[in-house]
Each structure stands twice: as structure tokens, then as C-alpha cells.
Image (cartoon, rainbow, N blue to C red):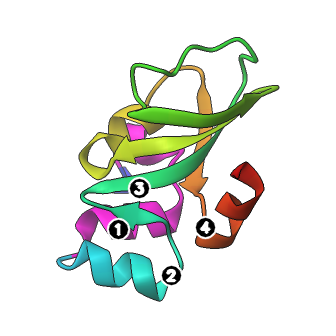
């Protein structure tokens, strides 16, 4: 046992640290992560190009060819990472979002 829960395997270290952080707002600011009111913008990479992850996202800004960008409640990140179709979840950094306008 490596001490890491299976659902955390596909979660980036920064998102894992954000979940555990006592001051999520400050952590997000320090790491340039798009975070507001308990929600974080993330990028997901899936094996299934037609995977429906909408039930995990509060909103989806971009979806194409197995990649999605959207906002997720921080408390739902581990559940998203544990979805069978999800390969990896990482933060969508503030500078990523300029391409979504």
C-alpha cells in the first residue's frame, strides 16, 4: 500500500494539495490556479472521446477529442479523478482561460 487512495491516482499533485490546503484561495493564488467560491477550473484527459463527464462538472467551457475544461467543486475532484473514463485531472491555470474567451 502506497498510502494513496485509488481515486487520487489520476489527480495532479497540485489539485491534491489544493484539496488538503487550509486556505484554498491563497494556495490557488500562489499556484496561479483558477479558483473561486469553492470551485476550481480543471482540464481532464479521458480515454473515451465521447465520455460524458457533465455530471462531475458544474460547467464545461471546452470539450474536444478526449479533453475537457470546466469548473468542478473542489470537494468533487477525487470523484472526478476516480471516474473510469478519466485518465488525468490537472488544474487549468489562469493563463489557459484567455483562450476560452
Residue named by callout 3: 40
- Name the outermost residue toward the right: 65
In percent of the image, x 45 and y 44: which residue is there?
71
Is residue 48 covered in magenta?
A: no
Distance (Cα) linking label 2 and label 4: 8 Å
Residue named by callout 2: 31
Residue named by callout 4: 93
Report x, y in % for residue 55: 39, 19
Residue 43 sits above or below residue 91 on the image: above
Report x, y in % for residue 54: 48, 21
Segment tinted magenta in the rendering:
5-21
Q: Are marks 1 and 2 in contact (CB under 8 Å)?
A: yes
Which dot marks residue 18?
1
Distance (Cα) linking label 1 and label 4: 13 Å
Q: Is residue 19 left or right of residue 70?
A: left
Element carrying mark 4: loop
| 2 or 4: tag closer to the N-terminus | 2
Report x, y in % for residue 46: 68, 29
Distance (Cα) linking label 3 and label 2: 12 Å
Amino acid at each position: 500500500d502506497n498510502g494513496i487512495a485509488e481515486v487520487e491516482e489520476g489527480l495532479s499533485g497540485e489539485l491534491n494539495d489544493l484539496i488538503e490546503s487550509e486556505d484554498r484561495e491563497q494556495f490557488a493564488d500562489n499556484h496561479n490556479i483558477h479558483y473561486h467560491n469553492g470551485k476550481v477550473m480543471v482540464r481532464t484527459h479521458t480515454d473515451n472521446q465521447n465520455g460524458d463527464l457533465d455530471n462531475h462538472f458544474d460547467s464545461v467551457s471546452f470539450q474536444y477529442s478526449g479533453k475537457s475544461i470546466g469548473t468542478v467543486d473542489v470537494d468533487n475532484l477525487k470523484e472526478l479523478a476516480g471516474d473510469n473514463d478519466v485518465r488525468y485531472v490537472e488544474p487549468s491555470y489562469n493563463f489557459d482561460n484567455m483562450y476560452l474567451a
